[in-house]
Image: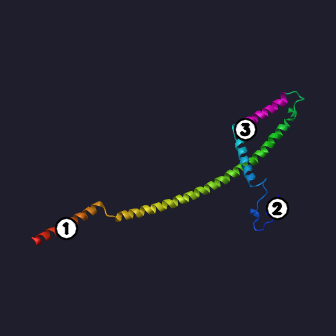
């Protein structure tokens, strides 16, 4: 409580960014979020639906066929307690499912942003590699081919042979 009061007195934080009171610290909010996701996942399973159906059928069977002294929700008034319990369950289920969906939306937003950043990096890397490939192709075009080097060496050998012949003619 003292922490919430001290944060309310801080004037260097905009009002919209001030922390609101959580259950008991920063970890509890995430724990509650994980709990809501667990509940939402559980409510969407066939096991939950079968269990809820068995519970409701058992409730109605008990309050219909049990001795009247043991009944606690009379069929004559339309199983009012069962209706209230199911309404209470539904009134908690809807907000818990919405909270779980909001958390999933937040995770999806973060994932989309990370994917966008990864795509930008991949594009930049691809563009860099494309420039490097073009530079290598240009450099390879400027390099001498094997045939060019062979022809140059043959020309030099022919020139050296011609010089040797001329020197041997002058000497002899």
Q: Determine the residue located farthest toward the left in the rendered image.
A: 172
Q: Which residue is mark 3?
A: 48
Give 165 or 79, whichever is nearer the viewer.
Answer: 165
| Side of 44 relative to 89 (left or right) | left
| Side of 172 relative to 27 (left or right) | left
The quarter holding residue 133 reads bottom left
> Residue 34: x, y in percent?
71, 48
Q: Single out the mark in the foreground, 1 or 3.
A: 1
The quarter holding residue 161 reads bottom left
Image quarter of the N terminus: bottom right
Q: Which residue is mark 2?
A: 5
Give 78 or 95, whichever is nearer the viewer.
Answer: 95
Q: Secondary structure at mark 1?
A: helix
Task: Give the residues drawn in magenta, as a range.
Answer: 47-65
Q: Which residue is mark 1?
A: 160
The quarter holding residue 131 reads bottom left
First in sequence, mark 2 or 1: give its number.
2
**Is residue 108 part of the magenta span, yes or no?**
no
> Residue 107: x, y in percent?
66, 53
Q: Secondary structure at mark 2?
A: helix
Q: Secondary structure at mark 3?
A: helix
Q: Residues within 10 Å of mark 3 (few under 14, many from 20)?
A: few
Give 96 or 61, whichever is nearer the viewer.
Answer: 96
Q: Single out the mark in the foreground, 2 or 3.
A: 2
């Amino acid at each position: 409580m003292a922490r919430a009061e001290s944060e309310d007195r801080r004037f260097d934080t905009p009002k919209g960014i001030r922390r609101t009171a959580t259950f008991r610290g920063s970890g509890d909010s995430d724990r509650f979020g994980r709990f809501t996701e667990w509940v939402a996942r559980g409510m969407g399973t066939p096991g939950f639906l079968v269990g809820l159906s068995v519970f409701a059928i058992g409730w109605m069977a008990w309050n219909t066929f049990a001795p009247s002294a043991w009944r606690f929700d009379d069929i004559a008034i339309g199983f009012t307690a069962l209706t209230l319990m199911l309404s209470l369950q539904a009134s908690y289920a809807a907000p818990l499912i919405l909270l779980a969906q909001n958390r999933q939306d937040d995770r999806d937003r973060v994932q989309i942003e990370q994917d966008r950043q990864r795509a930008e990096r991949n594009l930049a890397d691809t563009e860099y590699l494309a420039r490097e490939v073009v530079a290598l192709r240009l450099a390879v075009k400027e390099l001498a081919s094997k045939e060019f080097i062979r022809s140059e060496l043959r020309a030099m050998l022919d020139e050296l042979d011609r010089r040797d012949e001329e020197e041997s003619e002058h000497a002899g």
